[in-house]
Amino acid sequence: MNMFDITSKLFDRLVKTTNGCLVFAGGRDTGNYGIIWKDGANKGAHIIAYEHYNGPVPTGMLVCHSCDNPPCCHEQHLFLGTKQDNYDDMVAKGRNYIRRGIEVNTVVLNEQQVIEIYDLLDQGYTQRLIAEWYGVTHSTIGAIGKGKNWRHLYEEYRT
């Protein structure tokens, strides 16, 4: 597929929103970024848009959004930056909140149960037995016991 085909695939799927973004209305990845199939792989629609107006993205650089809207492809909302620049932008805009514990929508256990699990591990119960009691896998119990899951509680109760 040539560049003309790619850009027409992009521009045919852009929708202007009330906030001024040009949002890609095609497929999206898990981060909500627009994606287009190019050269045997999915490529970010915002990257294709940036390259259309500015040329190739230099190695080590990212195409970042000033609007903080992942599917946006508006040329004036896109800028180049390093991973650190992108992170600093996120922090400056207050978007670096990390959901933990019961705020995570896939969580099975609650904080009280995790604290109980710490106690059971200290008492010598096996991960498999504890997992059976709480309806989770033994690897989940192992991750809790090592502080890989529920790290904020691990740091508070285990160190």
Image (spheres, rainbow, N blue to C red):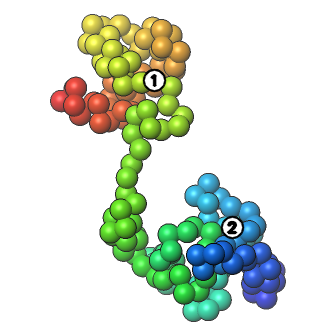
- Dot 1: element: loop
What residue is shown at x 77% (from left), y 75% (from top)? 13
Look at discs 1 and 2 and give the one toward the viewer.
Answer: 1
- Looking at the image, residue 126 sits to the left or right of residue 76; the answer is left
The amino acid on which the numbered mark 2 sits, given as a three-letter code, is Ile
- Looking at the image, residue 154 sits to the left or right of residue 100; the answer is left
What residue is shown at x 66% (from left), y 74% (from top)? 17
Q: Earlier in the sequence, mark 1 or mark 2?
A: 2
Please state which of residues 94 and 38 is positioned toward the viewer in this rendering: 94
Q: Quadrant of the N terminus?
A: bottom right
What residue is shown at x 29% (from left), y 31% (from top)? 153
- Looking at the image, residue 159 sits to the left or right of residue 110; the answer is left
Residue 116 placed where, x, y %?
33, 14
Residue 23 placed where, x, y %?
66, 73
- Dot 2: element: strand
- Density class for disc 1 (Cα within 10 Å; few <14, some 14-19, many ≥20) is some
What residue is shown at x 36% (from left), y 25% (from top)? 111
Please state which of residues 123 and 89 is positioned toward the viewer in this rendering: 89
* Rendered position, 55 above or below 78: below
Given the current orientation, which residue lies at the most extreme left position? 159
The amino acid on which the numbered mark 1 sits, given as a three-letter code, is Leu
* Rendered position, 120 above or below 19: above
Asked which quadrant contains residue 90, the reply is bottom left
Please state which of residues 15 and 118 is positioned toward the viewer in this rendering: 15
Q: Which mark is residue 30?
A: none
Q: CA distance from mark 1 to mark 2?
A: 35 Å
Asked which quadrant contains residue 69, the reply is bottom right
Given the current orientation, which residue lies at the most extreme front position? 18
Label 2, on which residue? 35
Q: Is residue 38 visible?
A: no
Label 1, on which residue? 109
